[in-house]
Image (cartoon, rainbow, N blue to C red):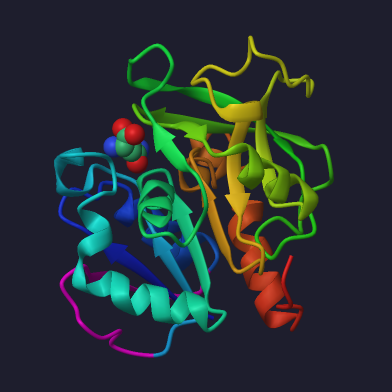
Amino acid sequence: MNFAVVVFPGSNCDADCFHVIKNVLHEEVEYVWHNEKKLPKQYDCIILPGGFSYGDYLRTGAIARLSPIMEEVKKFANNGGLVLGICNGFQILTEAGLLPGALVRNKNLKFICKDSYLKIENNKTIFTNMYNLDQVIKVPVAHGEGNFVCSEDTLAELKKNGQIVFKYSSPNGEVTEEENFNGSLESIAGIINKEGNILGMMPHPERCSENILGNDAGKLLFASIVKAFKGGTLSGN
Ligand SMILES: NC(=O)CC[C@H](N)C(=O)O
């Protein structure tokens, strides 16, 4: 399977994503520079990694979405290509209109860096098929603007279509306001588009994909993508 990791000025999780795909999953992966006007080749999945693209100026992701490569990412996604946006990548996807809603400042207005617990709300997606429904996984977060917001209509749509994929929870799966450290609407930590080929999430699975890091819960997310691709089950969420 061929992955691309897009590198924006200020990306800082690009190498981590590249490492997991290449050395943990043993799949093909290349970096693609934000300034490219064409994707250099046919990829099966594009990852928009975390970081501080364009220094987070204006709003997180607001300038990155205007990068030349984003036109290509949009075309790729609109043709059903798999796109995974992690943290700043999720912010870029919402700014680009590829996912609904927006990520605004954390409710305490502070950058939060810690382990979070995520409840799997939908395990029937290309990105989560190797997890169990309601399973709780520990995944690190590191963001200043991770507070997910959307309109009431959008929230109703997300619920109706099973597009809410991860929620912040306690270690034993309770979704409460107390556990909702960044203030996200309904504790939403990650969503998928209606068609099921674009996933955005604030936590960082690439930072917990190996035992040597003390936690490999994130590996199954990447492995799910490869499994869906190789198993030929790429048909929506
Ligand atoms: N880790 C990240 O990708 C951080 C995203 C963004 N810079 C924020 O602080 O919200």
Q: What is the x, y in percent for residue 35?
A: 15, 72
Left of 157 or right of it: where is 20? left
Predominant SS of the magenta segment: loop
- Ligand 1 falls in which quarter? top left
Instruction: Give the residue displayed 65% in from the left and 44% down from the top.
Output: 153
Left of 14 or right of it: where is 231? right
Residue lying furthest bottom in this view? Answer: 41
Q: Is residue 33 magenta?
A: yes
Q: What is the x, y in percent for residue 148?
A: 50, 34
Q: Viewer-proximal residue, 45 or 157?
A: 157
Q: Which residues are magenta?
A: 26-41
Q: What is the x, y in percent for residue 149?
A: 51, 34
Figure quadrant of the N terminus: bottom right
Left of 178 or right of it: where is 58? left
Residue 140 position (above or below residue 31): above
Q: What is the x, y in percent for residue 110?
A: 33, 15
Q: Is residue 2 magenta?
A: no
Instruction: Give the residue displayed 41% in from the left and 21% down from the top.
Output: 106
Instruction: Give the residue displayed 52% in from the left and 41% down from the top.
Output: 208
Instruction: Give the residue displayed 20% in from the left and 82% down from the top.
Output: 37
> Can see residue 29?
no
Residue 62 position (above or below residue 228): above
Q: Viewer-proximal residue, 144 or 153?
A: 153
